[in-house]
């Protein structure tokens, strides 16, 4: 069994990744866009959040498998799985045409301006000037978390897999819901695999194992705004939910220690960010109040292909793989065999 010290190290590692994902919270002030009205604020928030949605949705589908073979009946593994989505450079910032947005200008002039997305630079020289009821409101463009030079957006899970009757295997992955200051995030997912080369005698003599796999993952997160600036109110937060599905055909070698594996599949997912609470903007003419002003959706879908290798060392197993998809993915897994099968 894993020692308490090992479990503490795993929890600490997961918490570090959580801190990275939520390190943008100090500059996550998209509520200032509400001075432009709900429709414009929603459009600008969608641009800002889009790469995070795509990166996390693709990341949720990564690292489910390290072989096409299923475990023996009632055999059980537990693993620490870490993977990351490579975010394309063009997703780190976006150019917007200010002239297309009513009552908005850039301090210093100009119509075309490039602003960071949530995964972009921690710094921006863009300052907006919004006009409402003849009064000017000045605020900086939200900035990003500043990804590492590799543009890697990390994910991490604890995953357990159990061999079932009928040549099947069930997997459960989770990220315990943890909080950092005013933000929290948690993940849960389920996967089911069936090995065709055991289920059909005609395939049993093949030198490769072949299986089919399906999985669902869900990420829930929330972030509480600080009530400051010219937008006041109460109970201000963003609640996020991201759901992804993966359908895959897997193949792998059948060697006892070292193996290679690969898969071809289809991934689909959808995210939803809901801006909740009361938001109040006061001008010299009126007081404008917004209740749960908007929500932003994004989706992904497409084919994917993966290739990886694994090595077994007594009760431990290590794997590394790479997936080609909308946001390519690199995954690493450290597995420990808790129960032998029958």
Image (tube, rainbow, N blue to C red):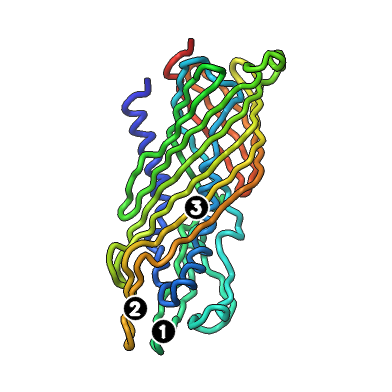
N-terminal label among 2 and 3? 3
- Residue sitting nearer the eye, 11 or 265: 265
Q: Is residue 99 above or below residue 305?
A: below
Q: Is residue 62 above or below residue 42?
A: above
- What label does residue 288 carry, if any? 2
Q: Residue furthest top?
A: 342
Q: Is residue 23 left or right of residue 152?
A: left
| Distance between mark 1 and mark 3 Cα atoms | 31 Å
Residue at image position (48%, 72%) is 39
- Mark 1: which secondary structure? strand
Q: Residues within 10 Å of mark 3 (few under 14, many from 20)?
A: many
Q: Is residue 229 something one can see in this rendering?
A: no
Instruction: Tell me whether the residue at label 1 lies in contact with that at label 3, contact meaning CB atoms closer than 8 angstroms.
Output: no
Q: Residue furthest left?
A: 234
Q: Residues within 10 Å of mark 1 (few under 14, many from 20)?
A: some
- The residue beneath circle 3 is 271
Where in the figure is residue 218, as x and y percent of width and height? 46, 43
Residue at image position (29%, 67%) is 227
Where in the figure is residue 262, as x and y percent of width and height? 65, 31
């Amino acid at each position: 069994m894993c020692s308490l010290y090992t479990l503490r190290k795993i929890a600490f590692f997961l918490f570090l990744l959580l801190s990275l994902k939520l390190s943008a919270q100090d500059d996550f002030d998209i509520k200032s866009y509400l001075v432009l009205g709900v429709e414009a604020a929603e459009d600008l928030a969608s641009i800002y959040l889009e790469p995070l949605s795509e990166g996390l949705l693709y990341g949720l589908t990564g690292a489910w498998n390290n072989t096409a073979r299923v475990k023996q009946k009632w055999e059980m593994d537990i693993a620490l799985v870490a993977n990351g989505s490579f975010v394309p450079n063009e997703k780190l910032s976006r150019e917007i045409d200010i002239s297309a947005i009513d009552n908005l200008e850039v301090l210093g002039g100009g119509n075309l301006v490039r602003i960071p997305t949530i995964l972009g630079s921690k710094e921006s020289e863009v300052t907006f000037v919004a006009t409402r009821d003849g009064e000017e409101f000045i605020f900086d463009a939200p900035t990003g978390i500043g990804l590492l030079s590799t543009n890697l957006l990390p994910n991490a899970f604890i995953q357990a897999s159990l061999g079932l009757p009928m040549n099947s295997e069930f997997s459960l992955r989770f990220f315990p819901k943890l909080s950092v200051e005013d933000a929290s995030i948690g993940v849960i997912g389920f996967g089911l695999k069936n090995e065709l080369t055991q289920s059909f005698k005609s395939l049993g003599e093949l030198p490769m194992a072949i299986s089919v796999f399906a999985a669902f993952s869900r990420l829930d997160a929330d972030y509480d705004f600080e009530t400051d600036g010219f937008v006041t109110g109460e109970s201000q937060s963003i609640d996020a939910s991201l759901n992804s599905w993966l359908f895959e055909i897997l193949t792998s070698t059948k060697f006892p220690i070292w193996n290679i594996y690969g898969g071809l599949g289809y991934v689909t997912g959808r995210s939803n960010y809901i801006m909740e609470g009361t938001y109040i903007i006061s001008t010299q003419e009126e007081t404008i109040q917004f209740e749960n002003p908007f929500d932003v959706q994004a989706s992904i879908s497409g084919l994917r292909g993966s290739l990886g290798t694994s090595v077994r060392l007594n009760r431990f197993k290590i794997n590394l793989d790479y997936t080609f998809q909308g946001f390519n993915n690199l995954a690493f897994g450290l597995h420990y065999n808790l129960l032998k099968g029958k």
